[in-house]
Amino acid sequence: MATIHLLVGFMGFGKTTIAKELEEKIPAVRLTHDEFMVKLYGRNMPYADFHPNYDKVDNLLWNLAEKIIKAGTDVIMDYGFWSHEDRKKAYQRAKKISEKVVFHNVCCKMDVAKQRILKRSEDDAAELLISEDEFDTLAKRYEPWSYSDDYPVVLHNARTYEYIGQIVQVKIDRPLGSKHPKFGFEYPVNYGYVPFTKSGDGEELDVYVLAVDEPLKEYEGRCIGVIHRKDDDDDKLIVVPEALDLDNDTIERETAFQEKWFKHILIRDSAAEKVKKEA
């Protein structure tokens, strides 16, 4: 089954840039709502016409998404989904089309986004026209991604520890019982990565899947911690079944087959807050 990718972020956060990168990498069909609005209704439509036209384009794109998924191709819904309620409705609607749904949350500072939008409105006639007052008014409606958004997510432009508490989809490339391609040791746990991410070493973000006693090809679970290597720029997520938690000693023991060779710290929620304050 093909996947529906839902892009989250306010205007100017860089959603469409990431959507275009995903479009090429996956590959997938990108449906950017703003582009359809401009092509159909122009870049500066009267306010009274905006919401009715928005809804027409919205229904058109979701109908297109369903047809594309049925054809076996991934779809990127490049919308923004500004509120928790928007994300809830989008997830429910997407799940009716495909079993495989993942959000992509894009992080950016509001002042940076504002400058991007004002410059874009001035320089690019293909973009929606947004004034400074309009940006400030709309920014009040934006609700950043939080723990209440309890859906599978890829975090773009975020720190690794921000995955703690989040649901992630893992691709397993070294399942339980397989051997390391170079060093030959056997994996006592499932080991994989979160697709569409980038770790400090330039590769996808690695994952230990713990508390699952059978070889896996893919897995959806909750991140309960991060192993931060001090002598190797290659953090590892700790992912377990959603209703489960593990103590630090268990995590260290289960990952020691590989982590014993590296200086590292295990980051949990409280440690993440400390790292955040020190950053």
Image (cartoon, rainbow, N blue to C red):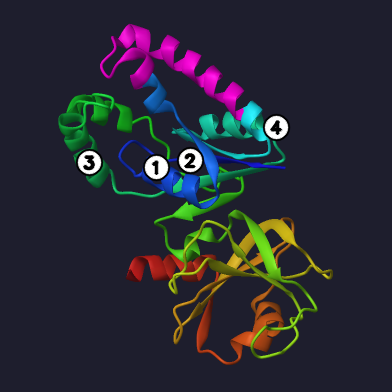
Label 1 sits on a secondary structure element that is helix
Q: Secondary structure at mark 2?
A: strand
Q: Residue at label 4? A: 70
Label number found at residue 15 = 1
Most extreme residue toward the right is 214
Name which quarter of the figure residue 227 lies in: bottom right
Q: Is residue 119 left or right of residue 140?
A: left
Q: Which mark is residue 116?
A: 3
**Disc 4 to disc 1, how far (Cα)?**
25 Å
Magenta segment range? Answer: 38-65
Q: How many marks?
A: 4
* Along the viewing direction, whichever of 260 and 54 lies nearer the viewer: 54
Q: Nearer the viewer, residue 126 or 209?
A: 126
Q: Nearer the viewer, mark 4 or mark 1?
A: 4
Mark 2 or mark 4: name the one nearer the start of the chain: 2
Q: Which residue is mark 2?
A: 7
User: What is the spatial separation of the Cα atoms under label 2 and label 4, in whole angstroms?
Assistant: 20 Å
Tell me which numbered mark, 3 or 2, is placed earlier along the sequence. Answer: 2
Circle 4 packing at 10 Å, graded few (<14), some (14-19), many (20+), is: some
